[in-house]
C-alpha cells in the first residue's frame, strides 16, 4: 500500500485558478458582444489580435524564463481580452500587438509572473500605449458606422464642449468610446455573473461606484453643467474599471477594510481627474495609482484577529 | 467559516457495531495532553480488564487501564498518529470480557469524590484535544456556562452523531455529573442543524425537564466548519469572545464533548474506566463505512485482518481524524487512541494539482475563522522571514484548514503555517 502523506487538510474545494480566469472570461462575454455589435470588424480584429499576441508572448516568456508553460492558467487570455476591451476601436494593429506584448512581458512577467505583478497588466499596457501613441489612443469613432467617422466620447463632449449625451445611449452603449466601455448594460450583466459566482468581491466596486456617485451628486448640485450622477457612472470606464479592473485580486488589497479604502480612494481620484485635470477621463490612472498603494494599504489595514 | 459537503452518508444512518475482541492491543502511554503516564505493570504480568496499567504522572496527565484481560507482552515504541512513535504497552488478550454492574451514584457524593472517580477512570477530552478531564473540571474560576459540544463539524465523522442518537440519555446523565462538579448556572447543548433526528430527542429532554440540570438550552447551529472549534463555539452560542491566548474559563465557559460526557457517565454509573470508544471508519475507499465500538489500543490493521472493515480500492490516503484536521498515516499499523474520533480512507483524487502562484484573492482571509491573514504566513515563510510572523499573530491559528480548503492556487497554507510556528516562540 503506497500512501500519500501530507499536511492537513485532505479535502479541497473545487475552485482553482483556471476556473476563476475562465469565470472572468464568461463575465466578459456580454461586454465583448457589445463591442462586436457597436464596432463590428474593428472590434473583432482587435480582440483576436490582443488575444493571440498575449498567448504567444506568454508562451515565449515561459520559454525564456525556462519555466513550465503557464498558458493553461488562463491569465494571459484574460489580460489580452481586457486590453482589447479598453482600446479605442480605431487602434492600429501594431499598437495593439505592441500593447499585448508589453502587458505580458513588462506588465506581468518582469515582476515574476502571475500573482507577483504590482500593476494591472492590461491597464499598464494601455498607459504605455497612451504615452507611445497619444493621438491614436484619444481618437474615437462613432459606433455602428462602416467608415471611421471620428467622434468625441461623451466625457470629452461634456468637458470641452458642454454637450450632454443621452442617458439611454450611455446605458446601452450607443456612444463612442473604448471597445468594451460603452455598454453599461452589458458590463452590468457580466458583473452580476461575477458577483453571483463569487469570482469577484463586491467591496471595491461598491465603494468605488458610491464614491463617484456621491462626488458627482455633490458636483452637479454646485454646478449643473458638471454632468449628472448617472452620466458620470455610465460614461467612460467607471463600470468596466470598477467591476473588471479594480477587482483584479493580484493588484488590489486582501483586507476588507483595505478594499473599501481602495474603492473610495479610486472613486475620489477619478472624479478629481474628471473635474480638475486636463484629461477627460481618469479611471485608468486612478486604478494604476492605487495599485501602487496596495501593499501599503494591506500593511495598515491588518484585520484584528478573533478575540484580540 | 466555510461550508463543506458533509459526506456523512451512509455511515450516519447505520447503527453502531461492536468489535471488542482484538488479538493484540497497543496502548501508548501518551494518549493525552500532558506528561505520559507511568507504567505500573511488568512484562508478562497478567492483568484484568479495567485494571490500572499506567498511572498519571503529575497534575496534567492521565491514568491508563487494560481494555481487556490478558498478559503484558511488551513495553516498547510503537507508531503513534500524533507523535509518530511513542512508548506503548503491548497487551495480549486472554479470557472473557468483564461485566460491569450498574449502580446509581449516591446523592451524597461530594464534588471531590466525583472528580476522583473521573481522574481514576483516565478520562480525557474525546473531541480530539485529549486534555485530562479532571483538570478541566477543576477550573480556577467560576464557570457560568457549560457548553456541550455535539457539533461534529468535520465532514465524514459521525461517531458523535451516532452516540447522541443511541445514548443521549446516558450523555445527559454524564452532564448531570459535570453540573454537580462545576455548578454552572446554565447548560448549552450545541448541535449542528444537520442532525435533525438528535435535535428531536433533545427537544423532548429540554421540554420534559427529565434531568437535574440548571437552565438547559439547545442551540442549533448552521452546518459550517469549524463550528465545533472551542472559541468559535463559545462565540456562536454565548456571544463571548475568548481573548487571544486566554482560555474559555476566562469568559466563564467550559466546553465538553458529548463522548466525554458519555465516558464520565460510564465511569460514575458503571465504574468503567475509559477503555472503549465509538470510532467512525469512513471514506470512499471503504466498502462499508460505519461506526464501531472498539477497545482503545486496537490497531487499524487488525480491523482489516478480522474482516471488520474491507477496502473497496487502494486508498490514496489514510487519515486519523477528520479530513480537515486529521493526520495522514503511513500504513495500517496505528492504534486507536482515547481521542481518536475516526479514520478516513480516501480514494485518489482525479486530478491532483500542484501548487500555483498565489493570486492574493484573499479567499483564505475570508474563510479564516480567527480573522488572520493566512497568505502572509506563506509569503513570510517562503522568504524565511520568521520574525515577522508574530506580528501576524501566527500562534492564534487553530490549523482548522479552511484557508487551504478554499485556495484556488492549491497552496497548502497549513503546511507553511506549521513550519512557521516552529520558528516562533509560543508565548502570547
Image (spheres, coloured by chain):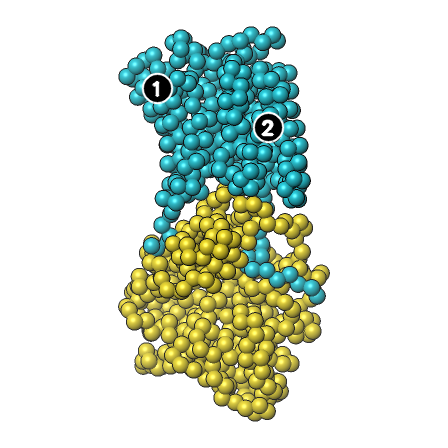
Chain colours: A cyan, B yellow
Determine crowd level at label 2: few under 14, some 14-19, many 20+ residues with C-alpha closer than 10 A: many
Instruction: Give x and y (percent) for residue B238.
Output: 34, 56
Q: Earlier in the sequence, mark 2 or mark 1?
A: 2
Is A9 drawn above or below residue B270 in the view shown?
above
Could you tell me which chain the residue with mark 1 belongs to? A
Residue A257 appears left or right of B361: left
Quadrant (top left/top right/bottom left/bottom right) for the C terminus of chain A: bottom left
Circle 2 SS class: helix
Quadrant (top left/top right/bottom left/bottom right) for the N terminus of chain A: bottom right
Q: In the rendered image, which quarter is residue A212 located in?
A: top left
The span from disc 2 to disc 1 (Cα, nearest Å) is 31 Å
Q: Which of the two residues, B188 or A306, is positioned nearer the viewer here?
A: A306
Tell me the residue that label 2 is attached to: A100
Is A291 drawn above or below residue A91 in the view shown?
below
Is A174 drawn above or below residue B290 in the view shown?
above
Q: Which of the two residues, A65 or B325, is positioned nearer the viewer here?
A: A65
Q: Is residue B289 visible?
A: no
Instruction: Give x and y (percent) for residue A72.
Output: 65, 39
Q: Which residue shows up at 38% across the image and 22% down it? A: A273
Instruction: Give x and y (percent) for residue B294.
Output: 58, 74
Tell me the residue that label 1 is attached to: A276
Could you tell me which chain the residue with mark 2 belongs to? A
Amino acid at each position: 500500500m503506497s500512501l500519500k502523506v501530507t499536511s492537513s487538510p485532505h479535502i479541497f474545494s473545487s475552485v482553482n485558478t483556471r476556473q476563476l480566469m475562465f469565470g472572468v472570461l464568461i463575465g466578459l462575454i456580454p461586454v465583448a458582444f457589445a463591442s462586436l455589435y457597436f464596432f463590428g470588424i474593428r472590434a473583432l480584429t482587435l480582440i483576436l489580435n490582443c488575444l493571440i499576441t498575449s498567448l504567444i508572448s506568454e508562451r515565449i516568456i515561459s520559454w525564456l524564463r525556462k519555466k513550465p508553460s503557464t498558458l493553461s492558467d488562463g491569465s494571459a487570455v484574460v489580460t489580452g481580452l481586457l486590453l482589447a476591451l479598453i482600446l479605442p476601436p480605431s487602434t492600429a494593429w501594431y499598437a495593439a500587438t505592441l500593447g499585448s506584448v508589453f502587458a505580458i512581458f513588462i506588465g506581468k512577467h518582469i515582476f515574476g509572473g502571475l500573482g507577483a505583478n504590482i500593476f494591472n497588466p492590461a491597464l499598464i499596457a494601455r498607459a504605455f500605449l497612451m504615452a507611445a501613441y497619444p493621438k491614436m489612443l484619444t481618437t474615437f469613432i462613432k459606433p455602428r458606422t462602416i467608415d471611421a467617422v471620428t467622434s468625441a466620447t461623451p466625457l470629452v463632449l461634456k468637458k470641452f464642449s458642454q454637450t450632454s449625451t443621452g442617458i439611454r445611449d450611455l446605458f446601452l452603449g450607443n456612444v463612442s468610446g473604448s471597445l468594451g466601455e460603452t455598454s453599461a448594460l452589458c458590463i452590468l450583466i457580466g458583473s452580476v455573473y461575477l458577483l453571483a459566482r463569487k469570482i469577484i468581491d463586491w467591496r471595491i466596486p461598491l465603494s468605488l461606484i458610491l464614491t463617484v456617485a456621491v462626488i458627482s451628486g455633490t458636483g452637479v448640485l454646485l454646478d449643473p453643467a458638471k454632468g449628472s450622477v448617472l452620466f458620470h457612472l455610465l460614461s467612460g470606464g467607471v463600470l468596466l474599471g470598477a467591476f473588471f479592473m479594480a477587482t483584479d485580486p493580484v493588484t488590489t488589497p486582501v483586507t476588507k477594510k483595505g478594499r473599501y479604502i481602495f474603492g473610495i480612494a479610486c472613486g475620489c481620484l477619478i472624479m478629481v481627474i474628471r473635474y480638475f485635470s486636463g484629461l477627460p477621463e481618469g479611471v485608468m490612472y486612478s486604478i494604476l495609482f492605487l495599485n501602487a498603494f496596495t501593499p501599503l494599504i494591506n500593511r495598515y489595514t491588518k484585520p484584528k484577529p478573533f478575540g484580540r | 467559516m466555510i461550508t463543506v459537503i458533509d459526506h456523512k452518508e451512509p455511515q450516519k444512518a447505520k447503527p453502531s457495531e461492536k468489535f471488542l475482541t482484538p488479538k493484540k492491543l497497543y496502548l501508548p502511554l501518551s494518549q493525552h495532553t500532558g506528561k505520559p503516564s507511568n507504567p505500573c505493570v511488568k512484562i508478562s504480568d497478567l492483568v484484568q480488564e479495567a485494571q490500572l496499567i499506567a498511572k498519571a504522572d503529575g497534575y496534567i496527565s492521565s491514568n491508563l487501564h487494560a481494555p481487556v484481560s490478558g498478559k503484558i507482552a511488551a513495553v516498547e515504541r510503537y507508531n503513534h498518529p500524533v507523535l509518530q512513535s511513542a512508548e506503548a504497552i503491548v497487551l495480549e488478550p486472554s479470557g472473557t470480557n468483564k461485566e460491569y454492574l450498574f449502580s446509581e451514584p449516591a446523592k451524597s457524593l461530594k464534588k471531590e469524590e466525583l472528580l476522583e472517580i473521573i481522574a481514576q477512570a483516565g478520562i480525557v477530552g474525546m473531541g480530539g484535544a485529549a486534555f485530562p478531564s479532571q483538570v478541566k473540571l477543576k477550573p480556577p474560576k467560576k464557570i457560568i456556562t457549560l457548553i456541550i459540544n455535539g457539533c461534529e463539524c468535520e465532514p465524514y465523522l459521525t461517531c458523535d452523531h451516532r452516540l447522541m442518537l443511541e445514548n443521549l440519555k446516558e450523555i445527559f446523565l454524564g452532564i448531570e455529573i459535570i453540573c454537580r462538579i462545576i455548578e454552572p448556572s446554565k447548560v448549552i447543548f450545541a448541535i449542528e442543524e444537520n442532525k435533525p433526528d438528535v435535535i428531536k430527542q433533545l427537544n423532548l429532554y429540554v421540554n420534559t425537564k427529565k434531568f437535574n440540570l440548571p437552565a438547559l438550552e439547545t442551540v442549533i447551529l448552521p452546518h459550517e466548519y469549524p463550528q465545533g472549534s472551542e472559541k468559535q463555539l463559545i462565540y456562536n452560542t454565548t456571544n463571548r469572545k475568548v481573548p487571544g491566548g486566554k482560555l474559555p474559563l476566562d469568559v466563564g465557559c467550559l466546553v465538553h464533548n458529548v463522548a466525554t460526557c458519555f465516558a464520565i457517565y460510564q465511569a460514575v454509573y458503571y465504574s468503567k474506566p475509559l477503555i472503549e470508544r465509538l470510532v467512525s471508519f469512513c471514506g470512499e475507499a471503504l466498502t462499508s463505512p460505519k461506526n464501531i465500538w472498539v477497545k482503545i489500543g486496537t490497531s487499524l490493521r487488525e480491523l482489516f485482518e478480522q474482516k471488520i472493515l474491507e477496502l473497496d480500492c487502494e486508498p490514496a490516503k489514510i487519515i486519523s481524524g477528520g479530513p480537515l484536521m486529521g493526520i495522514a498515516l503511513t500504513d495500517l499499523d496505528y492504534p486507536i487512541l482515547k481521542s481518536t474520533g475516526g479514520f478516513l480512507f480516501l480514494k485518489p483524487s482525479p486530478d491532483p494539482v500542484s501548487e500555483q502562484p498565489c493570486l492574493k484573492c484573499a479567499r483564505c482571509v475570508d474563510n479564516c475563522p480567527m480573522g488572520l491573514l493566512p497568505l502572509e504566513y506563506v509569503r513570510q515563510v517562503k522568504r524565511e522571514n520568521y520574525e515577522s510572523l508574530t506580528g501576524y499573530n501566527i500562534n492564534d491559528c487553530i490549523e482548522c484548514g479552511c484557508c487551504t480548503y478554499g485556495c484556488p492556487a492549491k497552496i497548502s497554507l497549513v503546511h507553511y503555517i506549521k513550519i512557521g510556528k516552529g520558528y516562533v516562540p509560543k508565548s502570547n
